[in-house]
Amino acid sequence: MLLMEKTIFKRIIDKEIPANIVYEDDDCLAFHDVNPQAPVHVLLIPKKEIASLNQLSEDDSVLLGHLFGVIRELTQKLGLENGYRVVVNCGDDGGQTVYHLHFHILGGRQLGWSPG
Ligand code: 5GP
């Protein structure tokens, strides 16, 4: 039997390691990034184990709609009325380091462009 090691985010979902959680419901969890790149840097993750954008299917469309609704709610709660950025890194070239789908929510300052 192939035993896959849990990702760090799955361990946060399972409450095996702590995180500064700002939102949780049955389908998703949001918490502050441990290495923030902006004054506000929150990660939103589905509880369903989806490795990356490439693993999304049609079955996930309701979940995705829900996640974007939560993003909108969260940005209000986090005081990002002046704007924010949502980033999903995908794969090695995209700079993905944790293979559990996550949305970076960044704000609290004027963000530069383009990405490095
Ligand atoms: P990626 O590079 O995969 O798009 O983003 C992974 C993010 O997860 C990084 O911004 C990194 O700082 C964050 N991260 C990695 N390990 C932990 C952790 O244990 N706790 C928290 N809160 N964030 C983490």
Image (tube, rainbow, N blue to C red):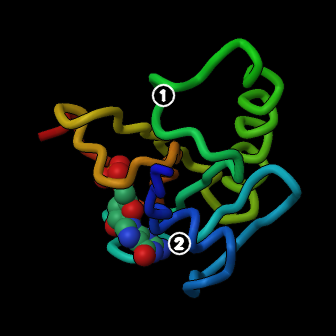
Q: Mark 1 points at which residue?
A: 53
Question: Number of numbered discs present?
Answer: 2
**What numbered label is drawn on residue 98?**
none
Question: Can see residue 11?
Answer: yes
Q: Which image quarter is the C terminus in?
A: top left
Which numbered mark, 2 or 1, is in the foreground of this view? Answer: 1
Residue 20 image position (x, y, % from top left): 60, 82
Amino acid at dot 2: His
Q: In this view, does 91 lie to the left or right of 68?
A: left
Mark 2 within 8 Å of ligand 1, using the beta carbon: yes
Q: Are marks 2 and 1 in contact (CB under 8 Å)?
A: no
Q: Name the residue under label 2.
A: 32
Residue shown at 37% from the left, 54% from the top: 98
Q: Which residue lies furthest to the top in this view?
A: 58
Q: Is mark 1 on a helix, strand or loop?
A: helix
Residue 78 image position (x, y, % from top left): 66, 65
Amino acid at dot 1: Leu
Q: In which image quadrant can residue 35 be found?
A: bottom left
| Whole-number angstrom distance, CA of label 2 to CA of label 1 | 21 Å
Taking depth in this image into account, of 18 and 111 the one nearest to the observer is: 18
Residue shown at 35% from the left, 38% from the top: 89
Please tell me whether residue 12 is drawn above or below residue 85 in the rendered image: below
